[in-house]
Amino acid sequence: MELNRDKRVLYGRRRGKSLRKGQQALINQDLPLFLVSIQNEKLDLAALFGPGLGKYWLEIGFGSGEHLAWQAHANPDTGILGCEPFINGVATLLGKLKSDRSTNVRIHPDAAESLIEKLPENTLDRCFILFADPWPKSNHNKRRFVSTSNITALARVLKAGAELRIATDHVNYGAWILWHMLQSNSFDWIAETPEDWRLRSPDWPPTRYEQKAIEKGLKPVYYRFRRNDQPWQ
Ligand SMILES: C[S@@+](CC[C@H](N)C(=O)[O-])C[C@H]1O[C@@H](n2cnc3c(N)ncnc32)[C@H](O)[C@@H]1O
């Protein structure tokens, strides 16, 4: 299947090792069933997911998709959008969705920015940014997904009361995320005690990247922010 991907700069890989035969078959045969088709007009989520779903969530940079597949299986009444430009990860997620028989997922196999701008205002109930690339060198910090412009873009599409979950294992990115989120008038940090950001709740399964970080002795942070009712601009 030929993918029509955004030509804007993406910092990061679109491809890893050559796809195995089974993975290529998932991309060719299964991806079209889950694909978000980006057109000029805004996306109509009710039409994209079909009837019977009351809520819509977005996961940005799902990697191999273990968190997204878990959420889709646990929340069959929720439509979950996933963005991931790394095609090997997309194939892995498709395999999981197939074995779980989950149909409440739609995939944008590209950078999230191009999908977010096509979402209407006030449409998402939850968003996950889990272990986004930390870009640790200071001259690469501007590549970080958490930025003033992406926070504003998310504020536009999240409903008042929606939750934004952001995790990282990188100390400097953790401080960066908090600083940027606290600058925004559109989000409130939900934490009341240190446990609220040091621990995941039972409805927040681990990701592959997180497990590797913990094996290395790192201590991730798990932030939750609530979209308030202030205007996004
Ligand atoms: C460090 S990995 C973490 C993957 C997964 N969330 C996990 O925790 O295992 C970061 C992921 O974000 C993806 N990514 C990078 N830039 C992105 C963007 N602009 N939009 C969506 N995903 C992006 C990368 O391809 C990569 O798979």
Image (cartoon, rainbow, N blue to C red):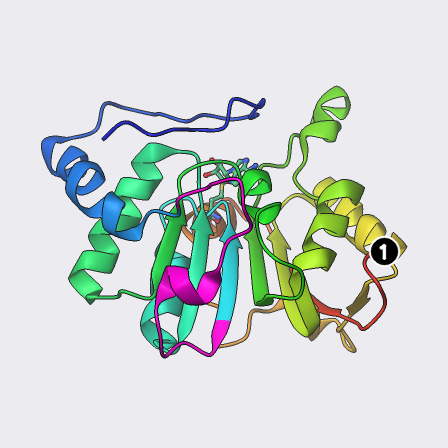
Q: Quadrant of the N terminus?
A: top left
Considering the numbered disc 1 on the image, is that residue within a helix, a strand or a loop?
A: loop
Position in image of residue 67 (x %, y %): 41, 59
Position in image of residue 161 (x %, y %): 70, 76
Q: Which of the two residues, 87 or 103, is positioned nearer the viewer here?
A: 103
54 inside magenta stretch: yes
Label 1 CB, ligand 1: below 8 Å? no
Does 220 sit above or below residue 205?
above
Residue that label 1 marks: 184
The quarter of the displayed image where residue 200 is located: bottom right
Q: Quadrant of the C terminus?
A: bottom right
Principal secondary structure, stretch drawn in magenta: loop
Q: Tell me where the magenta segment starts and ends, as one range.
A: 37-55
Does 114 sit above or below residue 190?
above
Position in image of residue 60 (x %, y %): 53, 49
Which residue appears at 42% of the width and 73% of the height? 78
Q: Is residue 147 visible?
A: no
Q: Is residue 132 visible?
A: yes
Q: Amino acid at mark 1?
A: Ser
Q: Residue furthest left?
A: 21
